[in-house]
Image (cartoon, rainbow, N blue to C red):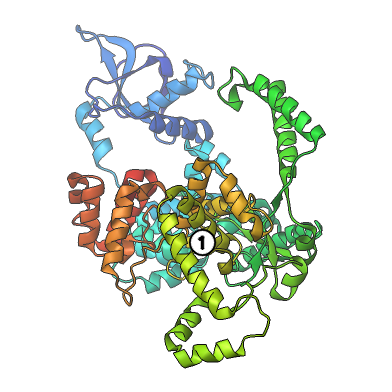
Amino acid sequence: MNAVTETAAAEPVSGIEIFVPLAKLKKSPRNARKVPHGEAAIEALAASIQHKGLIQNLVVEPEVREDGTPTGYYLVTAGEGRRQAMLLSAKRKQIRKSHPVRCWLDTVNDPAEISLDENVTRTPMHPADQFERFAELSNDKGWGAQEIGARFGVSANVVKQRLRLGAVSPKLLQVYREDGLTLDQLMAFAITEDHARQEQVFENLHHNREPWIIRRDMTATNVPADDRRAVFVGADAYIEAGGTIIRDLFSEDRGGFFEDAGLLDMLAAEKLREIAGEVEAEGWKWAEAHIDYPHAHGMRRFYPQAIPLSDEDEARLEVLSTEHDDLAEGYSSYDELPEDVAERLEAVSHEIDAISAKRSAYDANVIAHGGAFVVLHHDGTVRIERGFVRTEDEALADPQPEQEAEGDATAPEAREDLEDEDTDEDVQEIEEDEEPGKPISDSLTRDLSAHRTLALRVALADQPDTALIALTHTLTAQLFYSYAEAGCLEVRPTLTPLGSHADGIEDTPLAARASEQHEAWAERMPRDVADLWGFVVGLTEQMRTALLAHCVSRTVNALRLPWDRKPRSQQTADRLASALALDMAKDWTPTVDSYLGRVTKAHIVEAVAEGVSEDAARRIADMKKPDMAQTCGSACKKDPVMGVIGV
């Protein structure tokens, strides 16, 4: 077959191969494709032609004038996409516009039919074959994602995805070829290259083969990168220790999955122990490292005491505060600050924090005989809880413990039982046994104290402000000092731990806020409970009310337990929630594990209708429950309004 280079008008000779300058080619008005090629498709063709040349020639016919004479140009009947790709290469100066293009001259067949035939009569490669061929290019020729992408006009990320799919177990690829798996399902298996794990999960799948279920099962033994242990250890340290991170190239994985949970736990524990060593070096008798806070430690806790700053520190703090305000004036955020101003402002802030930290300190005895727990916070930061004293060290840490009240130390409940059993004969015996010369007998003391108690009750009822002080004092003494005998009101706060009722609740941001509130008050308390009354009296009315509110809040119990039904208590809890305008969506988001996967479909639909809209509820109504729960769980993470779902 002869090839002819066409540089000018020629007599139409059908059925020969010719070379036509790129600038002499035009789009045919009879091209069947009316929707043009996309930019990505043209890019891919340009890359292919640049690296491998024109694999498939263009089909052309001469352009003629109305009188039938040739114009010297050729109309592209088939191959318009390739013409556009070469024009793109010419625009980029990779080829000249005079570049000869191999074409097949056809003046016999209908151009419109040829164009239609080229786009219709062809069978695309099965995606599995494409994935495997990409993997072969990587394995056999050693090409990376960038090189392969450049040769095929696709991004490196697309190449990585195809390579990952090509690395899926051959058994699963064959199932995919036979339409036993969808592409979405295959992508879910590709989250790891462990063929044995892929095949194991595939064999254990039942009727529900949703991609999210496959991903869940594939990563069941792994730790997500946003887990507090992973955040604390860090990806670099984990990888350096020999760990592997699994990345999902087909969905948002928020940093991937740490494959070796055991290694991650070991690294987290080692790092916590290092920090515990630093804490112990502060002078504490001991410091224990735990990933989870040991709630059952049973130790008494001491808090730091307020200490007045020296005159020098007070003066320095005032200077720094003024400088801080002057530097920050006129700027609404750190991002707006000039670099030198931001650096100075940060230094000033650090110095202010350092001086402010001197306002409180632990008693030397507490440090010498007490210790601290170093644990992981919910967000992966370190949480250091100082001031705990073991039972055998309490006397050493607190050399002047609260003394028992003089006289009968029997518990109030026991005393009441004894009083009920008293008889005149018993009283007579007590009176006869009284010590001679004693100013006031025990029986008279009891008699007088009863009258005084009655008088105190009447007087306190007439003075609400003092009643508020007495109540605040009693609750504070028991919640912060564990001294039930420090107050004269028979009011007993009960604290119900919530950890046994909801897994992980103690490690939530809300629990951290509650702990911070309690510690902030504890640091202000006087060391000796005997000084507590004066402390409470000395507070402003606003601060005293805030302290009372805090103490009362610690006693709230709105648990609904199947074995302990208290309908009136629950009604009151509901009224309290209404009075507080409680908004659970601020601090709690329903997930598949915490809520959505544990209720009926009807309950989910009803909750979505109430919390979002009727339309949203209708859209999920026909889903299977796992899909419905997963969809709502994802929506809850993106849209806080979904958190309105009530319990």
Farthest residue to the front: give it. Answer: 437
Quick check: 455 left or right of 298? left
Residue 57, placed above or below residue 449: above
Question: Looking at the rendering, in which quadrant would you find the C terminus?
Answer: bottom left
Could you say where residue 556 lies in the image, as x and y percent from the top left? 41, 60
Could you say where residue 270 lies in the image, as x and y percent from the top left? 72, 63
Identity of the residue drawn at 32% across and 59% down? 573
Instruction: Tell me the kind of residue under disc 1.
Output: Glu
Q: Nearer the viewer, residue 51 or 397?
A: 397
Which residue position holds label 1? 506
Could you say where residue 463 lies in the image, as x and y percent from the top left? 43, 50
Quick check: 343 left or right of 79? right
Residue 374 picture quarter: bottom right
Identity of the residue drawn at 47% across and 79% down? 413
Asked whether the viewer can see residue 170, the reply is no
How many numbered marks are there?
Answer: 1
Could you say where residue 464 lies in the image, as x and y percent from the top left? 42, 50
Question: Looking at the rendering, in which quadrant would you find the N terminus?
Answer: top left
- Element at badge 1? helix
